[in-house]
Amino acid sequence: MNNVPIITIDGLASSGKTTISKLLSNHLGFYILDSGVLYRAFAYIKIIENIDAYTVDAIARIISNLRMAPNKDLGFSVIYNSSDITKNLYNEEIGLEASNISKNEDIRNVLLSIQHACAQAPGLIANGRDMGTKVFPEAALKIYFTASIDVRAKRRYEEMIKSGSNPNLLNIRKSLEERDEKDINREVSPLKAAKDAIIIDSSKLNIDTILDKILGLYKISRV
């Protein structure tokens, strides 16, 4: 892992970090890790296996059968008990449960080894909320994304419209505010910028400008 270049992208929900992570992955040919998918995996497993509580034994059993496998899109598929469960992880019920699971320090700690194993040549874009502070503190470049609540709410609203939903902008704004509060103030791995992270406010910047800025920063970090 020490010889593999890593760029961490942390930040607020709907601040643009996922979009820019994908663009960076495509531009540099690096793998991309969406760390949130691992908490979704735990949520899915809890539901299908009717797990009441995450005991030490239950966590150990799950982690021994869980891994991330590189795929042709430079991402990672989630493999559990030799089956690809990735497509089963993206519904609202699992998302809500994943948010609760992310507060579990024991689970966060055991997932470190799986996330570290994703650092493969030629490089890795690590997208999440504690990538630069806890998971990859020695990353070559750390970025922290922020944006105004109104801009983020509008982005999420437009995404949901495109997907065929009928969202309410005020409800989305309230939801984002609540998520910010939980992410920033939780006791375990709270959302914050690493001390050596570059903070990018994407409120008024377009994607191309942000991409060029990060590529320039990465080039400097490699000198």
Image (spheres, grey):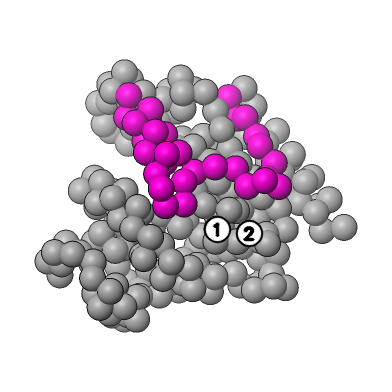
Residue 169 shows in the view: yes
- Horizontal and vertical percent for residue 173? 36, 23
Q: Quadrant of residue 202?
A: top right
Q: Left or right of 107: which side holds 91? A: left
Q: Residue at (28%, 33%) from the top-left corner?
A: 164
- Horizontal and vertical percent for residue 97? 24, 51
Q: Nearer the viewer, residue 112 or 218?
A: 112
- Residue that sits furthest to the right in the current view: 223
Q: Nearer the viewer, residue 78 or 29?
A: 78
Residue 27 shows in the view: no
Dot 1 amino acid type: Lys
Q: Residue at (18%, 64%) from the top-left corner?
A: 53
Q: Secondary structure at mark 2?
A: loop
Q: Residue at (59%, 69%) from the top-left corner?
A: 119
Q: Left or right of 112: which side holds 173? A: left
Residue 86 on the magenta span: no
Marks 2/1 in contact by CB < 8 Å: the verdict is yes
- Horizontal and vertical percent for residue 71? 48, 69
Locate the C terminus and report the quarter of the image it occupies. bottom right
Q: Quadrant of residue 61?
A: bottom left
For disc 1, the marked residue is 134
Tell me the distance, in whole angstroms, between the alpha carbons under discs 2 and 1.
6 Å
Marker disc for residue 137:
2
Dot 2 amino acid type: Pro
**Boundaries of the magenta span:** 174-203
Q: Residue at (67%, 59%) from the top-left corner?
A: 139
Residue 217, placed above or below residue 174: below
Locate the N terminus and report the quarter of the image it occupies. bottom right
Q: Left or right of 209: which side holds 171? A: left
Residue 184, placed above or below residue 100: above
Marker disc for residue 74:
none
